[in-house]
Image (spheres, grey):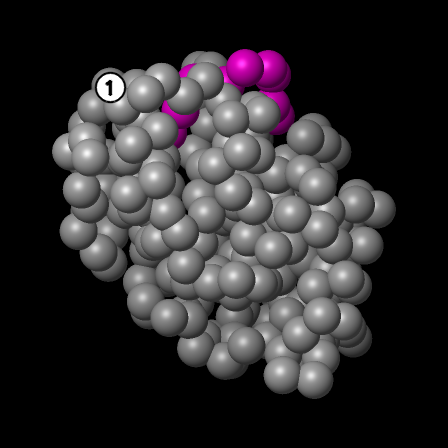
Amino acid sequence: MVETIRISRHHYRGALQKAAEVVRAGGVILYPTDTLYGLGGNALSQKVAERILQIKGSEPNKPMSVTMSDIVMIERYCEVDEWQREVLNKNLPGPFTFLLRTKTEIPVASEGKLGVRIPDYSFAHMLAGIADLPVISTSANPSGKSAPTRFDEVDPKILGSVDLAIDDGVTKYHGPSAVVDLVEKKIIRQGVSGIDLSGR
């Protein structure tokens, strides 16, 4: 039986610390974001990335997005020009995934681009900050199945495959993030909220 922590006002910090410990140790967690419940782990580890794709039944080397703590962390791993920085500052935290060029090789990136998130949900981006690394953020569903927006919607096989599960009931936006390519300057997927691609 996987260890499950139900977030509450009294256990918030403890849940964060425990989740960060599991991520740093190379484990896989199930955790809520602002949009969907996701599978998470060290995005810099090829082994962790492969395990998460296996849990989902996805094809090998499929790209996955990552959660970052803040824009400073994003700029640690990605190239960010002035216009891109303005878009990030205007829309994050929020229900958006932005594709940016990577500065270094990252297992979950594809063709030199990485999908980055700062969810509008403090647990998710604080987790990346405490772990001090980008955390994989891919929907916690078997490939081809609907993604869960509530803890009780998580597939039992998915739940049984992780090292730690974080339960915080229903997600804020109840749907997927928008996906925006800031390199090509185009919207890949319309999500649960509109996106502002203008400057200041």
Q: Position of residue 66 (x, y in %)?
A: 52, 40
Q: Which residue is mark 1?
A: 184
Which corner quadrant holds the N terminus?
A: bottom right
- Name the element at disc 1: loop
Secondary structure that dominates the magenta span: loop
**Residue stretch rendered in magenta on the structure:** 99-107
| Residue sitting farthest toward the front | 200
For residue 141: magenta? Answer: no
Q: Report whether 96 appears left or right of 59.
A: left
Could you tell me if residue 181 is visible in this image?
Answer: yes
Could you tell me if residue 58 is visible in this image?
Answer: no
Q: Nearer the viewer, residue 105 or 194?
A: 194
Image vertical order of residue 88 relative to residue 129, above or below: above
Residue 159 location, quadrant = bottom right
Q: Nearer the viewer, residue 173 or 73?
A: 73
Q: Position of residue 8 (x, y in %)?
A: 63, 83
Q: Report whether 190 appears left or right of 80.
A: left
Write the residue at 24% across / 52% down.
191
Write the residue at 23% across / 42% down.
189
